[in-house]
Image (cartoon, rainbow, N blue to C red):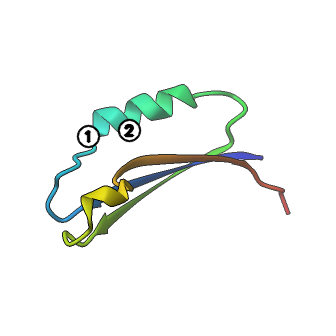
Amino acid sequence: MKRVEVLIVDDLKGSTKVSEKQINEVLRQFNDETIDKIIINRVTLPSSLNDEDNILGVHIIVREVAET
């Protein structure tokens, strides 16, 4: 089973806005018969986060998961 996990990371200041349109564009790329499951998670980090960390935005993980 192939699973796509989308992690949306933003901060309390809202400096990196991820719109629903952007998410849909990413998911359209995975609109494939080989994908069995899509999981979307959103995490909001404290605004004291350093901008140099560069973790804000959309992260995508595609993995094969063994069925049990």
- Using the numbered discs, state the Cα–Cα distance from disc 2 to disc 1 in whole angstroms: 7 Å
Q: Give the label on residue 30, or none.
A: none
Q: Are marks 2 and 1 in contact (CB under 8 Å)?
A: yes
Secondary element at tag 2: helix
For the view shown, which residue lies furthest in the front direction? 52
Residue 58's x, y, as percent? 41, 46
Q: Residue 49, relative to residue 7: is it above or below?
A: below
Residue denoted by label 2? 23
Q: Nearer the viewer, residue 60 or 23?
A: 60
- Identify the image quadrant of residue 36: top right
Residue 17's x, y, as percent? 22, 46
Residue denoted by label 1? 19
**Residue 32 as seen in the image, left or right of residue 43:** right
Mark 2 residue type? Ile
Secondary element at tag 1: loop
For the view shown, which residue lies furthest in the left direction? 13
**Residue 13 as seen in the image, left or right of residue 32:** left
Mark 1 residue type? Ser
Mark 1 neighbour class, 10 Å CA radius: few under 14, some 14 to 19, many 20 or more: few
Residue 50's x, y, as percent? 26, 65
Residue at (73, 32) in percent of width and height? 34
User: In the rendered view of the protein, which quadrant contains the C terminus?
Assistant: bottom right
Q: Nearer the viewer, residue 1 or 5?
A: 5
Mark 2 neighbour class, 10 Å CA radius: few under 14, some 14 to 19, many 20 or more: some
